[in-house]
Amino acid sequence: MRAAISSTPLATQTGAPATVSALERTGAASTTPIGSMADGERMNRKILANKLERTRLKVATFPLLNQLATIFATKTSEAFRALLNAPIEIPDWRVEIRRCGEYLDSIPAPATIAVAKFAETDGLAALHFNADLAYHVVDMSMGGDPLGARPVTERAPTATDLALCKRAARSALIAFERTIPRLCDGESLGAIECDRFETLPKMVKMAADRSETVVITLNLQLGRGGRSGALTLALPFAVLDPIKDKLRSNFSATATINSTIWEDALKRSALQCELPMSAVIERSELPLSRLLSLKSGDVLPLSATNVDDITLTLETHSGVRPVAQCGLGTLRTSKAVRLKDAPDPDLTTRLKELLL
């Protein structure tokens, strides 16, 4: 097949000097269309880019990474429970190995990122509070009701927000410090400090963009009012290098760790059980005729001394158990009772034995 050549001079068509290519002179046609060559080159570049971006390491290469995340989740929930004075649960978590630059690029700005520093090695890690978690930590730290929450307002974190989140970051980093000896036969990575906060992910600069990084994401449920958020700890492999061989091995105590984790989780769940308690101000007897004649607005007088001698009781399957003696008072705008003595030691001892 011969290429068709226009009779119009080339210079007139393009405004360029009238030169004729070898293809036009000979009329020879390429066996591969130019468009196909371009598509193939783009495909090759895309494949190469994917290979460069894809991490060479997999979570399966380090069997104990999942155990590391499980213990970290357990200790973080305990730390946040003490910090916020509210029930904290971490129902699920995940572990990934990602390129450092790719991970930081995935974080929307402005962000709440604590940059952690390992004291012994000067290595850096990142602890990211997603917008929901940062909001709830700030709100609950300032006295927000753990049984309810206002809609999350997304905004740039203020200095006050970062100061309150720093307390939570320290708690999480201490939880990670305590995780390592539990997993690695007492071996430690040393103290981890909250070095600073960054709101722009690119300013974290904890490792080179292509450095492989362990990313542990914990999904937290805070209180009983539907509060939730995600906490992500990103650890470049350089900071984990002292324990890398431990993480790679099939640790012989894995079954023991699993058993302990299960026991700890069961104990935490038992401690979060809500028990029906009653504060009995007075018990009295009424004639049936009086009972049948009661109507809205009727007043039943109480003994003046009873408000200082209230019995706090616990309802059990075997009946009602007295817990302690209390006095009646107020707390803010609500009625309350104050314990006059410690709860019944026989009852508390029995409950502790069931948990141990």
Image (cartoon, rainbow, N blue to C red):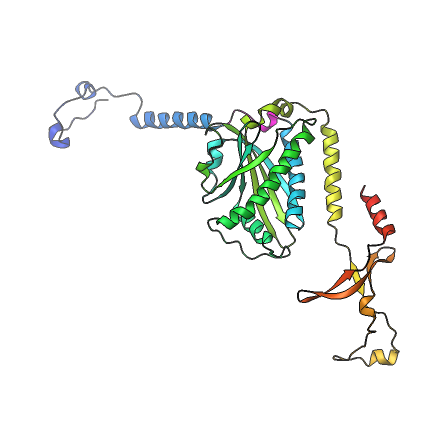
Residue 270 can be seen in this image: yes
Residue segment shown in magenta: 55-62
Residue beneath the point at 56% across and 51% down? 138
Residue beneath the point at 62% across and 57% down? 145
Residue 7 can be seen in this image: no
Residue beneath the point at 64% across and 47% down? 83
Q: Position of residue 18 (x, y in %)?
A: 12, 25
Q: Position of residue 12 (x, y in %)?
A: 11, 31
Q: Which quadrant would the C terminus be assigned to in this image?
A: top right
Q: Which is more toward the observer, 34 or 105?
A: 105
| Whether residue 172 is situated above or below residue 153 in the rendered picture | above
Q: Which is more toward the observer, 350 or 64?
A: 350
Q: Is residue 60 magenta?
A: yes
Q: Is residue 44 magenta?
A: no
Q: Position of residue 342 (x, y in %)?
A: 82, 54
Q: Which is more toward the observer, 113 or 122?
A: 122
Q: Which is more toward the observer, 106 or 33?
A: 106
Q: How many marks?
A: 0
Decide if residue 199 is on the left or right side of residue 334. Answer: left
Q: Position of residue 300 (x, y in %)?
A: 80, 77
Residue beneath the point at 77% across and 66% down? 328
Q: Main secondary structure of the magenta part?
A: loop
Q: Would you identify the image quadrant in which residue 32 lies?
A: top left
| Whether residue 221 is situated above or below residue 123 in the rendered picture | below
